[in-house]
Amino acid sequence: MFSPSQLRAARALVGWSQSEIAKAAGLSVPTIKRAEADRGIKVSEEAAAAIASVLKKVGVEFIEENGGGAGVRLRKAQSPARHK
């Protein structure tokens, strides 16, 4: 679905804190921290899907490995709103 570095980059693109994405996805901050960690306990498929869904709703596109590396970008003409 996405790598920890893609998640960190996606969150930075929309300017959200870990607590903001946790609230929007209905998850805990420790779950977001685990999802962003390069090592350690991984999150469930359901948690990963919730995170991806929230980020996609605000315009993030996850780019799969294509020889140049996996990445993220924002869709054109999309301005993410902060979720409080």
Image: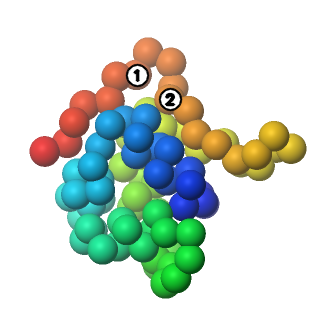
Front-most of residues 19 and 51 = 19
Q: Are marks 1 and 2 in contact (CB under 8 Å)?
A: yes
From the viewer's perspective, tell me whether residue 68 is left or right of residue 38.
right
Q: Secondary structure at mark 2?
A: strand
**In the image, what residue type sits under mark 2?**
Leu
**In the image, what residue type sits under mark 1?**
Gln
Disc 2: which residue: 74
Residue located farthest toward the bottom when viewing the structure as drawn: 41
Disc 1: which residue: 78
**CA–CA distance in space, label 1 to label 2:** 7 Å
| Crowdedness near tag 2: few (<14), some (14–19) or many (≥20) residues, C-alpha within 10 Å | some
Q: Quadrant of residue 56?
A: top left
Q: How far across and how far down the image is residue 2, in percent? A: 59, 58
Front-most of residues 65 and 8 = 8
Q: Is residue 46 visible?
A: no
From the viewer's perspective, tell me whether residue 35 is left or right of residue 14.
right
- The vertical placement of 19 against 80, above or below, is below
Residue located farthest toward the right when viewing the structure as drawn: 67
Q: Secondary structure at mark 1?
A: loop
The quadrant the C terminus occupies is: top left
| Crowdedness near tag 1: few (<14), some (14–19) or many (≥20) residues, C-alpha within 10 Å | few
Numbered tag placed on residue 14 in the rendering? none
From the viewer's perspective, tell me whether residue 39 is left or right of residue 71.
left
Q: How far across and how far down the image is residue 4, in percent? A: 54, 61
Front-most of residues 12 and 21 = 12
